[in-house]
């Protein structure tokens, strides 16, 4: 019993890599955690965050007991209570709201991907809120704009095989910080580079990926569609297109050709993007004449008012040059659409009463302010998310969370900023303490996570809580008193006759016995080498009837950002800088900010600014600055560098408010405006001004306070 044992687990975090983990447990305690060398894609190495996962599991500030608020909202003052009291309190409040005139839709679940595991993020929780009749949550904060845009062109959420990148000769990271956010794919890109491939990165910011690429192209923020259309112009003008591929497998070539030849000359695109016309020419020619040519298309492109259209447009490029014909060619946005789990059975959307409203999670600010249609939100149940920190228009979100007539429950591993506003805080298990089933959005493997530790103190898993609440509300035992393992079997279609082909033969028992399993797809997976797109026409839709029916331009077009000097000159006169706030390499969204070793590595909230913008503002390196617009303000330490285009500033995140200067992070300035498609968030479409903060004479300089700020919980 006391001999060390080794267990297989899965990294739960929101990242395309979904690494396979190996954990050594000795006397009930995890003593080592590393990558599983047997996993063919994640191959035994971990990022520097997750290799410190045990610092999270055994952190002295892990939540251990349910807590009830005793101070004002936002103050984070709590007293310990029992689970019985906590559950009874939730049930009483949910019941009284459901029975009131406002009804159960006044209850709003709020969750995202604190864990990506299907069971702890997307199973009994969904059943519970559906059965309760609560408002539904549209989970738009990350990927929906691009998801919808991509589907218009391609017809599914499928793309080239990630392994194929090792054989590419030209690789474009388009709005993708691959070296940081998808490190196992980056390794394959380097394998290709050693074999002679060129790596290009398109990003207004010299990210770590851009720094390590052969060519960094830095367009103006939110102008990617124009760049892609300029490439198409050159390709058609110089007859570099793949006629045969287009003829067989695409629709709309002729109108697209006419549009790009007439409207998107390199000179016009140069004006929009700020790139030299010669660079646009060179990029187009390289892309059209190098095979295989791969595009890693990621989130940087999507988080703008025109983000959906940008993704839809870039996704047309491989068809133009026939890149899909090659293994190692095409575009990869996400592999998430390749795992056909039985979501209907798992989530039971049929339990939700017809006509139940849906609230867009990117508009939490509006929802809490009572600005959306339907009853006001009276109760908020947060799990797997930290909205006080990650949601846009933060001041308004926090204002809503302060409402005394709002009943807020937060299920968490740590006392996050969101917890500070809760009426009840519930302690959550970590990945080593609960069961889960994992698909992924970055490769083709499915895995099971077996718990190897007993839950810490009174921590409980998400599904445990929903089972308890369901029982107390008298919900059907056959739907709710179901084990995590049984839920996994249901997700895998076990016992059903019509198992989708990619999942045939993949059972929970097999995953438990033999570890990660690859979907049943060909070894050298090439989805569109010979057409077979998922669109209505079965072809790559350069022209899309569906888009026309949905009120969009049916052809690719440049759809500008909402907040840019070109688009909003009056706003830009007051707030002339475009703010990007992508994740810091040391954090995973807001997860890990409270891990001392990682926060020390990230130092303090920084703002990278170009010397041409720093100089007229009188900024010195290392100086404390305030970043602001009409929505709010936050503080950071200035880093003056040519790592950003003039006119662009970058604040890596996502810092906890209470571990930042003045208690706010970059989301104090971001807007809850939605993208053109999928109701997506527009974090990177944000104009701000930056000013120096005077250091206090005599006292500790504010920048020093910010730099030395420690966890104060
Ligand atoms: N280490 C780490 N890894 C992560 C995460 C993390 O927090 N930390 N988060 C995970 C999650 S949830 C996600 S969604 C993914 C995100 O993965 P990525 O999309 O790779 O990450 P981002 O850093 O959000 O955006 C990528 C780049 O887009 C750039 N960008 C911003 N605006 C534009 C634009 O208009 N055009 C172009 N071309 N580029 C632009 C940004 O400067 C940034 O460098 O990463 C996942 N992996
Ligand atoms: N300014 C700006 N804002 C952004 C972004 C950006 O790039 N810039 N990125 C956006 C993107 S892409 C995303 S995906 C979102 C991410 O937003 P979130 O999904 O909210 O991600 P995290 O900040 O990592 O918070 C997840 C929380 O879940 C908790 N958790 C982990 N496991 C469990 C569990 O098993 N049970 C429970 N109950 N809790 C658990 C963690 O402790 C953590 O506090 O942020 C968005 N916000
Ligand atoms: Mo995300």
Image (tube, rainbow, N blue to C red):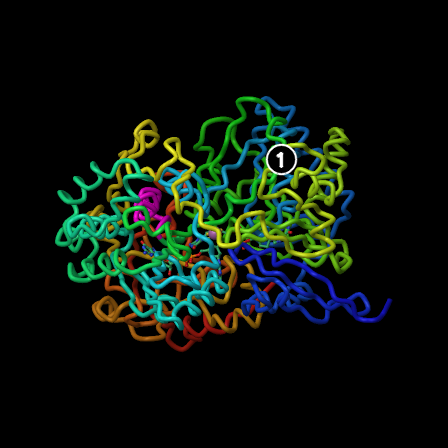
Q: Quadrant of residue 214?
A: bottom left
Tell me if mark 1 has few (under 14), some (14-19) or many (20+) residues whose alpha carbon lies within 10 angstroms of its own. many
Look at the picture and state if 467 lies above or below 171.
above
Inspect the magenta stretch and tell me whether residue 364 lies in it: no
Look at the picture and state if 532 lies above or below 295.
above
| Residue 463 screen position, x and y as percent | 70, 44
Indicate if the residue with disc 1 has its beta carbon within 8 Å of ligand 2.
Answer: no
Q: Callout 1: helix, strand or loop?
A: helix
Magenta span: 301-317
| Residue 628 screen position, x and y as percent | 33, 56
- Identified at 43% across, 42% down, the residue is 144
Q: Is residue 488 left or right of residue 150?
A: right
Name the outermost residue toward the right: 1
Q: Is residue 604 left or right of residue 283?
A: right
Name the outermost residue toward the front: 244
The answer to whether one can see residue 329 in this image is yes
Q: Is residue 381 left or right of residue 307?
A: right
- Identified at 15% across, 44% down, the residue is 263
| Residue 215 screen position, x and y as percent | 29, 67
The answer to whether one can see residue 394 in this image is no
- Identified at 48% across, 51% down, the residue is 525
| Residue 86 screen position, x and y as percent | 73, 43
User: In this figure, which residue is indicated by the disc labeled 1?
Assistant: 347
- Identified at 36% across, 32% down, the residue is 537
Q: Quadrant of residue 583?
A: bottom left
Q: Is residue 179 left or right of residue 454?
A: left
Quadrant (top left/top right/bottom left/bottom right) for the C terminus = bottom right
In the depicted view, which residue is nearer to us: 333 or 31? 333
In the depicted view, which residue is nearer to us: 295 or 706? 295
Look at the picture and state if 492 lies above or below 584.
above
Quadrant (top left/top right/bottom left/bottom right) for the N terminus = bottom right
In the depicted view, which residue is nearer to us: 417 or 14? 14
């Amino acid at each position: 019993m006391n001999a060390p044992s080794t267990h297989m687990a899965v990294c739960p975090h929101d990242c395309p890599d979904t690494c396979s983990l190996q954990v050594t447990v000795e006397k009930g305690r995890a003593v080592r955690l590393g990558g599983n060398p047997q996993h063919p894609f994640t191959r035994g190495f971990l990022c520097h965050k997750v290799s410190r996962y045990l610092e999270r599991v055994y952190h002295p500030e892990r939540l251990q007991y349910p807590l009830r608020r005793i101070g004002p909202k936002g103050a984070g003052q709590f007293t310990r209570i029992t689970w019985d009291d906590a559950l009874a309190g939730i049930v009483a409040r949910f019941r009284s709201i459901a029975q009131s005139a406002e009804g159960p839709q006044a209850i709003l679940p709020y969750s995202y991907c604190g864990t990506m595991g299907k069971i702890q993020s997307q199973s009994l929780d969904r059943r519970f809120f559906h059965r309760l009749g609560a408002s539904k949550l549209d989970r738009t904060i990350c990927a929906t704009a691009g998801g919808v845009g991509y589907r218009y062109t391609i017809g599914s959420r499928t793309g080239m095989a990630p392994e194929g990148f090792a054989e590419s000769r030209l690789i474009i990271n388009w709005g993708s910080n691959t070296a940081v956010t998808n490190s196992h794919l980056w390794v394959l890109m380097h394998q290709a580079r050693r074999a002679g491939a060129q790596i290009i990165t398109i990003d207004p910011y010299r990210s770590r990926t851009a720094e390590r690429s052969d060519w960094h192209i830095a367009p103006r923020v939110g102008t990617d569609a124009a760049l892609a259309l300029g490439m198409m112009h050159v390709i058609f003008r110089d007859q570099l297109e793949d006629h045969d591929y287009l003829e067989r497998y695409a629709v709309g070539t002729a109108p697209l050709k006419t549009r790009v030849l007439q409207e998107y000359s390199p000179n016009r695109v140069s004006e929009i993007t700020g790139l030299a016309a010669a660079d646009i020419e060179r990029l187009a020619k390289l892309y059209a004449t190098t095979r295989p040519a791969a595009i890693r298309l990621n989130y940087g492109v999507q988080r703008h008012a025109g983000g959906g259209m940008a993704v839809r447009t870039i996704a047309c490029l491989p068809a133009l040059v026939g890149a899909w014909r090659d293994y190692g060619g095409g575009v990869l946005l996400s592999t998430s659409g390749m795992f056909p789990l039985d979501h209907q059975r798992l989530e039971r959307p049929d339990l939700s009463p017809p006509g139940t409203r849906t609230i867009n999670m990117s508009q939490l600010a509006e929802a809490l302010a009572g600005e959306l249609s339907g009853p006001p939100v009276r109760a908020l149940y947060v799990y797997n998310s930290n909205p006080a920190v990650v949601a846009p228009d933060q001041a308004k979100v926090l204002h809503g969370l302060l409402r005394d007539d709002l009943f807020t429950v937060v299920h968490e591993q740590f006392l996050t900023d969101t917890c500070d506003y809760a009426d009840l805080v519930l302690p959550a298990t970590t990945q080593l303490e609960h069961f889960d089933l994992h698909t992924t959005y970055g490769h083709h493997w499915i895995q099971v996570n077996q718990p190897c530790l007993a839950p810490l103190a009174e921590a409980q898993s998400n599904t445990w809580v929903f089972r308890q609440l369901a029982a107390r509300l008298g919900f059907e035992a056959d739907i709710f008193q179901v084990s995590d393992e049984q839920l996994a079997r249901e997700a895998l279609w076990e016992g059903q006759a019509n198992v989708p082909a990619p999942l045939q033969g993949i059972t929970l028992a097999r995953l438990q016995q033999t570890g990660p399993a690859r979907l049943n797809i060909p070894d050298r997976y090439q989805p569109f080498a010979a057409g077979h797109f998922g669109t209505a026409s079965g072809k790559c839709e350069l022209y899309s009837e569906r888009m026309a029916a949905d009120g969009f331009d049916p052809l690719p077009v440049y759809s500008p950002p909402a907040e840019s000097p070109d688009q909003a000159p009056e706003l830009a006169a007051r707030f002339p800088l475009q703010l990007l706030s992508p994740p810091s390499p040391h954090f995973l969204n807001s997860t890990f900010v409270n891990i001392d070793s990682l926060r020390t590595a990230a130092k303090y909230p920084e703002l990278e600014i170009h010397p041409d913008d720093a100089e007229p503002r009188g900024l010195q390196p290392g100086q404390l600055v305030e970043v602001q617009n009409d929505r709010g303000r936050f503080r950071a330490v200035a880093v003056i560098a040519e790592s950003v285009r003039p006119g662009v500033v970058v604040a890596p995140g996502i810092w906890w408010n209470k571990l930042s200067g003045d208690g706010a992070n970059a989301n104090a300035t971001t807007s809850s405006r939605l993208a053109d498609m999928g109701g997506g968030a527009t974090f990177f479409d944000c104009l701000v001004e930056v000013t120096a903060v005077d250091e206090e004479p005599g006292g500790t300089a504010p920048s020093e306070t910010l730099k030395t700020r420690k966890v104060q919980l």
